[in-house]
Amino acid sequence: MRPDMKTNLTSIAANRRNFLRDGLRVALLGGVAVVAGTLARRNSRRLPGQTCTSDGLCRACAAAEGCGLPQALSFRQATKGNQP
């Protein structure tokens, strides 16, 4: 084997290694981006036509009984056992 062939094979192996490493890095970053986007989209969904008018203070809200927002649902669940 000639010395220049050995250098060429080493260079090809290094290029392949870099290609695989970079490809894996791009795939992982893409996966993280997809997961982050999915979580952001899920958290931004609201019930249609429902907005909080009392800054999340359900105890002082007149519409808390019919509200479908998560804060109101949690409030009703917590106060259900405290009714006289």
Image: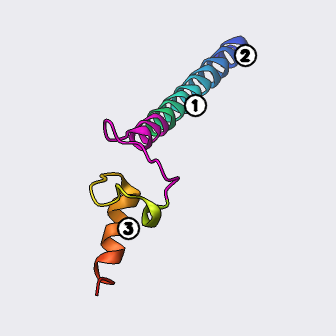
Whether residue 81 sits left or right of residue 10 in the image: it is left
Q: Position of residue 73 (x, y in %)?
A: 32, 61
Q: Quadrant of residue 17?
A: top right
- Residue at 31% across / 36% down in the picture? 48
Check residue 27 for magenta coloring.
no
Q: Residue furthest front?
A: 62
- Residue at 39% across / 41% down in the picture? 42
- In the rendered structure, find residue 65 and report the number of the disc placed on it: none
Q: Amino acid at mark 1?
A: Arg
Q: Amino acid at mark 2?
A: Pro
- Distance CA(mark 2)–CA(mark 3): 77 Å
Whether residue 34 sits left or right of residue 3 in the image: it is left
Q: Quadrant of the N terminus?
A: top right
Q: Quadrant of the C terminus?
A: bottom left
Q: Nearer the viewer, mark 2 or mark 1?
A: 1
Q: Are marks 2 and 3 in contact (CB under 8 Å)?
A: no
Q: Amino acid at mark 3?
A: Phe
Instruction: State the extent of the magenta-drawn residues as a range.
Output: 36-56
Q: Earlier in the sequence, mark 3 or mark 1?
A: 1
Instruction: Please give the residue where the numbered disc 2 appears in the rendered image.
Output: 3
Which SS class for mark 2? helix
Badge 1 crowding class, 10 Å Cα cut-off, few under 14, some 14 to 19, many 20 or more, is few
Closer to the camera, 56 or 44?
56
Instruction: Please give the residue where the numbered disc 1 appears in the rendered image.
Output: 21
- Distance CA(mark 2)–CA(mark 1): 27 Å
Closer to the camera, 9 or 56?
56
- In the rendered structure, find residue 75 and report the number of the disc placed on it: 3
| Count of all numbered marks drawn on residues in the image | 3
- Distance CA(mark 3)–CA(mark 1): 50 Å
